[in-house]
Amino acid sequence: MNNLIALVSSATMETLIMVLSSTFFSLLLGLPLGILLCVTDPAGGIIPKPLLYQVLSRIVNILRSFPFIILIILLIPLSRLIVGTSIGTVATIVPLSIAAAPFVARIIETALKEVEPGVIQAARAMGSTTTQIIFKVLLPEAMPSLVSGMTLTIINLIGYSAMAGAIGGGGLGDLAIRYGYQRFRSDVMLAAVIVILVLVEVIQVAGSKIAARLMAKR
């Protein structure tokens, strides 16, 4: 029993490290991309640039279309270049971040486009610059939707991190496969699944409450 608790605890920490780190890096990559997609949209962006929008939109669509397992394999050379290895918890952060970035970009684009046009027009009438509109109007107004979207992103990353266990990515997925499935330890597999379900539920509840509070303050 003690051995099982130790295994699950260690794997849970690895999963949290992967998910939180990749969430940070995917937001770092996806935020500017999502903002660009919103403001350059020819159908209502504040600085319409049809060609740039089409190029960025195609790139995002292509990256989103890759199955995650295939993407991990394709990014093995990049993982080795950045972290020096292609297996383990740290190495998995690279494909997780890249896989989530286009998803984050679309979430941000969609959330920003939900802001009432009248609010943007009022900001323009007051002499606000494009940068001020983005950071003082669009992002604050869209914050509840952004929180809900990032909650969904984190939940998806938990699922991705579990899939990464199939190729030695570490975490709860790796624990379930190597110690549970391959060694016929149903108790280990069940424990890993339960922890993943608990993590998803906790994150969903926390994200919903934060989004509701932000909405109430608007």
Image: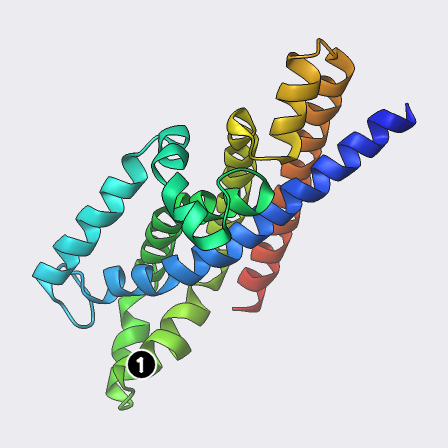
- Front-lying residue, 65 or 93: 93
Amino acid at the residue labelled 1: Thr
Q: How many discs appear?
A: 1
Colour scheme of the rendered structure? rainbow
Q: Quadrant of residue 174?
A: top right
- Looking at the image, which residue is at 75% across and 20% down? 188
Q: Is residue 56 left or right of residue 152?
A: left
Q: Nearer the viewer, residue 18 or 81?
A: 81
Q: Could you say where residue 126 lies in the image, as x and y percent from the top left?
A: 29, 90
Q: Is residue 88 left or right of residue 122?
A: right
Residue furthest to the left: 51
Describe the element under mark 1 as helix, strand or loop.
helix
x, y percent for residue 4: 83, 25
In the rendered view, would you say 28 is above or below 172?
below
Q: Does residue 208 appear anywhere in the picture?
A: no
**In which quadrant of the rendered view does residue 204 lie?**
top right
> Residue beneath label 1, please?
131
Which quadrant holds residue 115?
bottom left
The one of 175 and 194 positioned closer to us in this rendering: 175
The residue sitting at the bottom extreme is: 127
User: Where does the image place residue 128, in percent across and percent down from the top left?
Assistant: 29, 87
Q: Badge 1: few (under 14), some or many (20 or more) residues near its Cα, within 10 Å?
A: few
Residue drawn at x 56%, y 38% as measured from the top left: 158
Q: Quadrant of the N terminus?
A: top right
Res. 109 visible in picture: yes
Residue sticking out furthest to the right: 2
Question: In x, y percent, where is residue 133?
Answer: 32, 78
Residue at 34% from the left image edge and 74% from the top image edge: 134
Compared with 70, 18 (above or below) is: below
